[in-house]
Image (spheres, grey):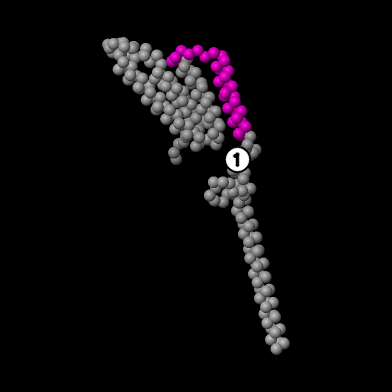
Amino acid sequence: MSYKAPWLALAAASGACAAFNGVFAKLTTTELTTSWSSAISSSLHLSSSNKFIEFIIRGTFFLLNLAFNALMWALFTAALTRASSTTRVSIINTSSNFLITALLGLMIFSEKLPPLWWVGAAGLVVGNVVIGRREEGDEDGDGRSRRQQQAAKGVRLEGDDGPVGEGYRDHHEGEGEEVDGDVLELDTDVEDEAQGVSARGDGGDERR
């Protein structure tokens, strides 16, 4: 039996990858990378203005940017295939992205996060939660989706290839019974008509 990671972990990991993706994209162009390349060049007994070292470092950050971007989409898609709601996946993805981005910005770029930033981030998370709860409200008390409810009623939805639920079979069995009744009535009418023709023929023979 193969192990499948839960959608919650996949969604959180995709948000983390999105945060690292942003960090590496910024390191590709920021002046901080120039300072790092100068320090590395000096430690290698090279000129502090060695452009080759700086080019290698910026190129590495650019490749990491592409790699984490691809990894983020792979994890996000995997979470969508395992979760029952795309909104829930987006909530976890956005929340983890914001929190990890804030921590990385604070540690790497020494960015200050004013209280207003946290208020805005909290408002975004709350808004996503409200949207998720509204989507849950579209399901009935038993947790059945609209497709499951319609299938139980015997309604065939677009994209369905075969019969769904007992209600669908009962519905079509009822149609079959109606068709059989119509055929039986038609056969009876044909027999009555044939008997009438035969009776008229016998009466004509007797008169002759």
Asked if the magenta segment contains residue 108, the reply would be: yes
Quarter the N terminus occupies: top left
Image spot of residue 160 (x, y percent) = 55, 47
Q: Which residues are magenta?
A: 107-136
What residue would you read off at disc 1? 145
* Type of amino acid under label 1: Ser
Towards the viewer: 149 or 25:
25
From the top left corner, tell me how far across and down residue 44 is, in percent: 28, 13
Looking at the picture, does residue 15 appear above or below residue 1?
above
Furthest-left residue in this view: 45
Q: Residue furthest bottom?
A: 208
The one nearer the camera, 142 or 170, is 170
* Count of numbered tags: 1
Q: In this picture, is 67 found above or below 38?
A: below
Can residue 70 be seen at all in this image of the molecule?
yes
Report helix, strand or loop for mark 1: loop
